[in-house]
Image: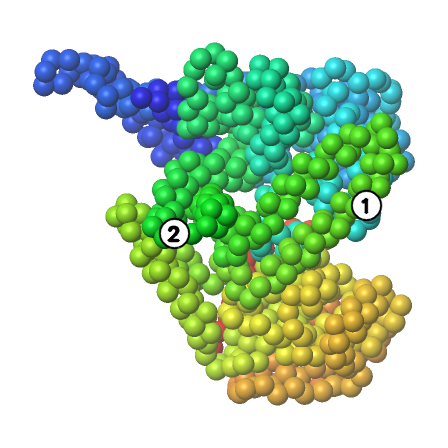
Amino acid sequence: MRVLAIFCFAFAAAVFVYTSALPLGIRVGLMMGALGLLLVGFSRRSHTGERLWSSRRGKILVLTALGFLAGALWCGGYEALHLAPLRELEGKTAVISLRAAEDGNGKESREPILCRSGSERVLVYLDDGVQQLRLGDELQLRAELHAVDPREDISRISKDITLIAYQRGEVKLSRQGLKWWELPKGVYSLLQIRIGQMFPADTEPFLRALLTGDTGKLAYGLRNDMSLAGISHVVAVSGMHVNLLCSLVMLLCLRRRRFAAGFCLATIWFFAGMLGFTPSVTRAVVMNSLLLLAPLFRREYDAPTSLSFALVLLLLPNPHGIRSVGLQLSFASVAGILSFSQPLYNWFKGLYNKKKCRRSVERLLHFLAGSASTTLGASILTIPLCAYYFGTVSLIAPLSNLILLPMLSVIFTVSYPLVLLSFCIYPVAAFAGRLLAWPVRAVLWGIELLGDVPFGSLYTHSPYVILWLAASYGIFALAYYGRKPGIGLICILAMLVTVPIFQRISTDHLRFTMLDVGQGQCLLAEAGKAVIVIDCGGSRDEEAGEEAARTLLSRSRGSIDALILTHYDRDHVGGTLQLMERMKIGCLYLPDIEPDNAWRQRIVHRARELEIPISYVLQSMKLHFQGGTLDIFAPIGTNTENDGLSLLLSEGDYDILISGDLSAEEERQLLLREAMPDIEVLVAGHHGAKTSTSPQLLQYCRPELLLISVGPNSYGHPTQEVLKRAERVGAKVYRTDEEGTILLTR
């Protein structure tokens, strides 16, 4: 019986429950239930008179309850002894001493840098002009301190960052040498510098990510293609990289078992220290360490036990780490491989085992079966997580992994020795690096090609995809336990064919969507076969364009008839380039203002490269679509930065007015210049700024609905003045920062 595995998994379950958003009453009830099970397990006797603890089921019951209680108590202690004292520092200003835990080389001036204050990991925001920090530097400064909220800031607390410090005084900086425990990080910085020197500029960001996990220089388009192709894990520096490193060390040690095991252990732990003991790497290092040590101590290696033990080791220093997406994906993929890969491999083998074929063909089939079963096994438990966190289900992932992983494994295995060789014989290593760039370029081309395959990915923006996913897992469970995986696979694929059919079912009436893109604006209008996009920008430039593309693709809309930009502010156009890359655009409509604007120049240049027709709106014009019209009103001509296009979307007697970022005076001139019907929906100007959506416009239009596209911001949008104006005219307000994406249908 796997005693340690049962205890550890119960411990992790308690940590997950404790750190989740479940109501306090439910969490307390679960803990009391575990305590009750523990008492029953120790006190109750079976019909034979033996204690329940002595039976197999009784032991499982007691170990589960014991592990659950231990996890709950550990979380409570962490909360009381570690996090509670930090909350007392919230908003206070104090003089603190810090030591830089990373190299600031290459960071932007406003980017925070990770430091340590004793055992605490502190994220420090320094003012402009402060000398760039290097790893190991000591500094003393007066800072405003804020404790990281584990319920709100999951990304930081999962990395064990507990404090944020903002500089509020002078910094005293002292250059120091590295401590022995900082040596791996020092080597990491040297590797990054050398990778930048060795490899050509077009391949260096990808190789930097592949070898060190630093994805900061990867272009958004490449990262998005990798996500769509289902191979993002290759630059996450996960268990695959640790396994390849172990294989390389074993090969170099020429099968000298004890020496190889010791050298391999030292190498992988040093490697984990270089990468900051990220969850996926630490999990792989712990499991490989147990695998190497088991034969030396004459013990049998058990993968589920080592997996559970690695999980508890990660949660002991920081229970909130269980909410890390990387940790969940890493452990889910390994759990899926351990649970499902072997049965799937046996099933694949059964398809061709009875047929006579050449030995070379048989080996190829074995390789394909092993690769497919491993990929599918890992995907079974990671697909729901990817769908939940990223809104994507990559259908092409098995093919992508089958084609690209062997090449990437070779590139990784060759690249590390080359980088190390460069410290001894740089010209030879640099020449080899330029040769290696060609297979890397082939991989990048493959990623782009696979990421663009139609229906290679599905998006959970569509409810039909969610229903298909839920039904598929139900069918798979029945088929798997009924030992008929082939029938289950056929049913799942048959259901998959129906998803695009249902997605294409649309009404001929107008469907208007205001996407939740943070502090920005992106509007979609669909009627029949017509698709119109108005503005495309948000808090993060490319993500706004990708959100628009995924929303339309999830509705089986592969092209856009008209892309209209009201003006060239970044929060209205920042995602346009990504949208143009992902979707076919019929025509781009632009205001002929701000000729020197950098965003205008970039968009026009890329549109010409993609051969997208451009129409500058010099005077008001009308577009017709099935059952309705779109009036595009030319700029007012005030030459202010908020001047631009405004639009009236009409279907029958239903009208939507979009005023862009026009000021109150420009809104008044618009009303004088253009004849307006009764307005049912008004999109608030300038994200709810008090200088727009004037009382005159509201009184004239008297809309039933006021839609505000807004996200977290420092401007106070939407202002109370605008909200009160809407209340006075009886308009109901919907905001994307509260409602999320807003959908209106007729």
Query: Can the viewer see residue 80?
Result: no
Which image quadrant for residue 425?
Answer: top right
Q: Quadrant of the N terminus?
A: top left
Residue 31 percent coordinates (x, y): 35, 26
The residue lying toward the viewer, choosing from 492 and 666, is 492
**CA separation, marks 1 and 2?**
44 Å
Tell me if 701 is positioned left or right of 592 in this view.
Answer: left
Residue 252 percent coordinates (x, y): 66, 25
**Callout 1 crowding tier (Cα within 10 Å): few <14, some 14–19, many ≥20:** few
Taking the spot 44% from the left edge, 75% from the top edge, the residue there is 505
Which image quadrant for residue 5?
Answer: top left
Q: Count the labels in the image.
A: 2
Residue type, mark 1 in image: Arg
Q: Is residue 708 above or below residue 63?
A: below
Residue type, mark 2 in image: Lys
Tell me if 733 is positioned left or right of 111 in this view.
Answer: left
The residue lying toward the viewer, choosing from 696 and 439, is 439
Residue 221 percent coordinates (x, y): 69, 56
Q: Is residue 139 above or below residue 464?
A: above
State if disc 2 and disc 1 touch (CB < 8 Å): no
The residue lying toward the viewer, choosing from 434 and 382, is 434
Q: Is residue 273 above or below residue 510?
A: above
Q: Is residue 445 above or below residue 648?
A: above
Label drawn at residue 434: 1
Taking the spot 64% from the left edge, 69% from the top edge, the residue there is 583
Residue 213 percent coordinates (x, y): 68, 38
Taking the spot 77% from the left edge, 34% from the top edge, the residue there is 418
Q: Secondary structure at mark 1?
A: helix
